[in-house]
Image (cartoon, grey):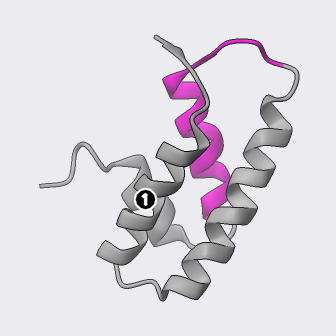
Amino acid sequence: MEQLFDEKAIRKELKIDAKGIGIPSGAAEIFIDKTLSATKQKLKSKKIITSQDLERIITTELKKYNADFAYVYENRDKII
């Protein structure tokens, strides 16, 4: 599926996920800013990406800062 990089929507999702697992808002903002910055850098050369590509890149970047945060983002539609 074709995916547009909607930074505002992704930022909102990540904030919700971070709050849900108890990451302090200041730390979450730092993680999110660094993750989205690195994601934008990796996507610069691509015109179209799949949703799986985007999720994989974001998850990989989040793992650098908080493994639980990355896990929740990666499985957000599967967790019950």
**Quick one: 80 or 20, which is closer to the camera?**
20
In the image, residue 15 lies in the stretch drawn in magenta? no
Q: Which residues are magenta?
A: 46-63
Secondary structure under the numbered disc 1 in the rendered image = helix
- x%, y% of residue 44? 85, 28
- x%, y% of residue 68? 45, 70
Give above or below for 54 relative to 9: above
How many numbered dots are placed on residues in this image? 1
Give above or below for 40 relative to 46: below
Q: Residue at x 57, y 50 (%)?
A: 59
- x%, y% of residue 17? 37, 64
Quadrant of the image occupied by residue 16: bottom left
Give above or below for 19 relative to 45: below
Circle 1 residue: 71
Q: Residue at x 61, y 31 (%)?
A: 5
**Quick one: 60 or 33, which is closer to the camera?**
33
The residue at the far front in this view is 8
In the image, residue 58 lies in the stretch drawn in magenta? yes
- x%, y% of residue 53? 60, 27
